[in-house]
Amino acid sequence: MSDQIILTTSSHLEGYRVTEHLDIVSAECVFGMNVFKDMFAGIRDIFGGRNKSSQNALRDARTSCLEELRKEAREKGANAVIGVDLDYSEISGGGKSMLFLVATGTAVKVEKV
C-alpha cells in the first residue's frame, strides 16, 4: 500500500482487514463567505439554477478539509480512515459570514486480505 491514506464513508474497506482502531480524527476548516457572495454577484455563472463557481469553491473546501483529515490520521500512524462524515455549517455574526466544514472519522490500520 502507498503512503496515501485511504478515506471511506463506509465502516469497512472491501479487500482490506482492519488490524487496529487508533483514534477518532477530525479536521476543521473555515472559509470566508464573502467569496461566495462575490461569486453570486456574477450572475453570468448561473446556468440552469447552478453556480459553477460556488460548486468549485465548495469542492475546494472539501478537498482541503479531507487533506487535513489525512494529515491527522497519518500523525496517528493510520493508513486509512473509515466512517468519514462531512458536516457543513454557516457561522455568521457581526456582519460577517463564514463556511465551517468539519470532517471526522476513525483512524485505523488496514492490511490487504
Image: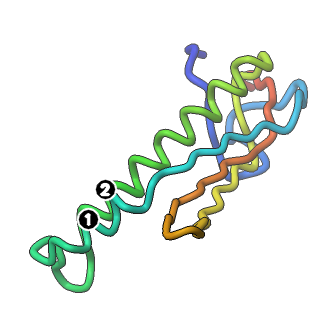
Across and down, in percent, residue 56 comes to 31, 56
Look at mark 2 in the image and give the residue it sits on: 56
User: What is the CA distance from the residue labelled 2 to the residue labelled 1?
Assistant: 14 Å
Query: In the image, is residue 50 above or below residue 68?
Result: below
Which residue of the protein is positioned furthest toward the left in this rendering?
A: 44
Look at mark 1 in the image and give the residue it sits on: 38
**Image quarter (top left, top right, bottom left or bottom right) of the N terminus:** top right
Q: Name the kind of residue labelled 2 in the image.
A: Asn
**Local SS, label 2:** helix
Residue found at x 59% / y 57%:
100
Q: Name the kind of residue labelled 1 in the image.
A: Asp
Occupied quadrant, residue 12: top right
**Local SS, label 1:** helix
Across and down, in percent, residue 24 comes to 85, 38
From the image, state whether disc 2 or disc 1 is nearer to you.
1
**Image quarter (top left, top right, bottom left or bottom right) of the C terminus:** top right
Few, some or many C-alpha atoms within 10 Å of disc 1 (few <14, some 14-19, many ≥20)?
few
Q: Which mark is residue 16?
A: none
Few, some or many C-alpha atoms within 10 Å of disc 2 (few <14, some 14-19, many ≥20)?
few
Q: Nearer the viewer, residue 40 or 4?
A: 40
Residue found at x 24% / y 66%:
39
Occupied quadrant, residue 66: top right
Q: Are marks 2 and 1 in contact (CB under 8 Å)?
A: no
60 on left or right of 44: right
Residue found at x 76% / y 22%:
78
Residue found at x 49% / y 49%:
62
Q: Work out whether mark 2 precedes mark 1 in sequence or the reverse, and give the earlier one.
A: 1
Which residue of the protein is positioned furthest toward the front in this rendering?
A: 94
Rendered image coloring scheme: rainbow
Q: Nearer the viewer, residue 6 or 67?
A: 67
Occupied quadrant, residue 41: bottom left
